[in-house]
Image: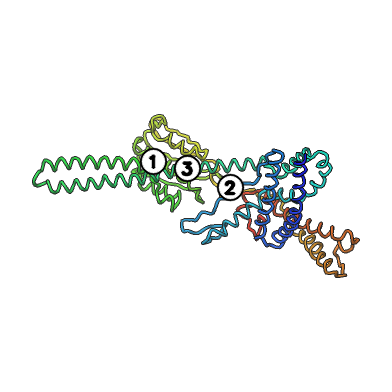
Amino acid sequence: MLQRFGQVLVLFALILVQVPAIILTVVMLLLSVALGMVFLFPPQTIMVRELAELNRRLVRQWTGMEIDPPYLPAPPPPVPQADGMYRSERTLYKSPWIPAWNSRWKWLMSDPATWRDEVWLLFDPVVKVALIPLFLLLPARGLRVYALWCDLLLGATAASRLAGQVSHLRRTRNLAADSQAAEMRRIERDLHDGTQARLVAIGMTLGAVEQLVDDNPSAAKALLAKARDASAETLTELRRVVRGIHPPVLAERGLADAVRALAIDSPLQVTVDVELAHRPEAPVEAAVYFAVSELLSNAARHGEARTATVDVSTKGPDLRVTVTDDGMGGADPAKGSGLIGIERRLAAFDGVLALHSPPGGPTTVTMDLPRVLPDHWAGNLVKMPRWKSAVVVLLWATAWCPTFPQGVVAAIFKIFGIEEKAWFLALHLPEVWQWPVIFGMITLGVIMHILAIRIPANHDRERWLVEATPTKPWCP
């Protein structure tokens, strides 16, 4: 019992930290949201999250209730382009600091858990005071009820859990694809070392032939035959592993130019039609590139084809690749034609492969990779309804009034004892109501500013993350 009372005292002692944190949070939100000092928003959010995490830890230790953090996954660090520059919206930067800061600001602003933490911090002291009778009579039960209150606002929601699972699956997918790419690069290094040694040996053999060709022609012929066999083995090894080497053109120029390079190198007459306005992620590019390479190789080697067509197109966020050749047809994945390997490669992205190859040809292979392109690239973002847009415009047009004239300016008049009441509502009220109304007006204004930002962010988070900026936190 004494231990429970001690835990309750610790909870009330935290109010001494929470009250200054509430005041600081209101000030920083006011400055960052209403006055445009956006650099104050991330540290304020981190401060509140630290307090929330401390509360989760105490509740877990005292009641055994596990409260999972509800925060959305943090954005990945910015990746430099081929020219070494970092892109943020339509601006290029030499340093990754500004793109990383913009992504972090959007992540914190658009995460619903951020605002749930703010609400928890604002009302948590009130809840503790309201639970005083229960804490005094049944401290263990009171702590349990308090834990349920914390879980209500600080616990993970179904949406946050789903977002975490999606992020985990995406990381797993990219890890699998990157592991495969790393394996290919390892094969490339092994080939460099092994093939190079084999070629050096062939060169030494030919040097010995030059010395023996006059004095011992039979030995020279034997060495020549050995060199010929070694060169054939080396060529076979090169052909077997060259398909697994990560081509520089893919990393530097993207999927479209890499496929065109495949068409140029192919013994077939290949027609390429690429409709790809933006580059997909690197693992997706690698999967599609090596799949197309395998299909063109199969068409030339097994299908006896003379011409082929490669079509790369998009449908919303989906990517579709179609490879058609005029070969003899009859392709069967069970015969070891490499189609099973392509299916496994596409499976990492939930992709599917459809094969139509009747005897006599032609052979058509269609590969669909769903949702591998961001929605904002697809150009199918739905704009807000007119009533939502009207609400946002109304909020931005009126939020200044309770925030500044009826709130901040009235507070300044009150602090400095200025007798002029003008049209400040709080100053016309009785003395006991003036400060509560002033704080209420400031709170109302901040809430209106936050709603003006949150409505478009909640309507289409993908579009908001693309188009919004700290200086323009709304979507057109």
Residue 390 visible in the shown view: no
Q: Mark 3 sits on what residue?
A: 177
**Element assignment for label 3:** helix
**Element assignment for label 1:** helix
User: In the rendered structure, are the residues bearing label 2 and label 1 in contact, judged by CB atoms less than 8 Å apart?
Assistant: no
Farthest-out residue, left: 215
Residue type highlighted by circle 2: Asp
Q: Earlier in the sequence, mark 2 or mark 1?
A: 1
Q: How is the image coloured?
A: rainbow
For label 2, count other residues whose C-alpha is less than 10 Å away and answer few (under 14), some (14-19) or many (20+): some
Residue type highlighted by circle 3: Ala
Q: Mark 2 sits on what residue?
A: 375
Residue type highlighted by circle 1: Leu
Mark in front: 3 vs 2: 3
Q: Mark 1 sits on what residue?
A: 296
At x 9% / y 47%, what residue is drawn? 214
Q: Position of residue 44 (x, y in %)?
A: 68, 56
Q: CA distance from mark 1 to mark 3?
A: 21 Å
- In the drawing, does residue 408 fall left or right of residue 236? right
Q: Position of residue 31 (x, y in %)?
A: 71, 61
Residue 461 visible in the shown view: yes
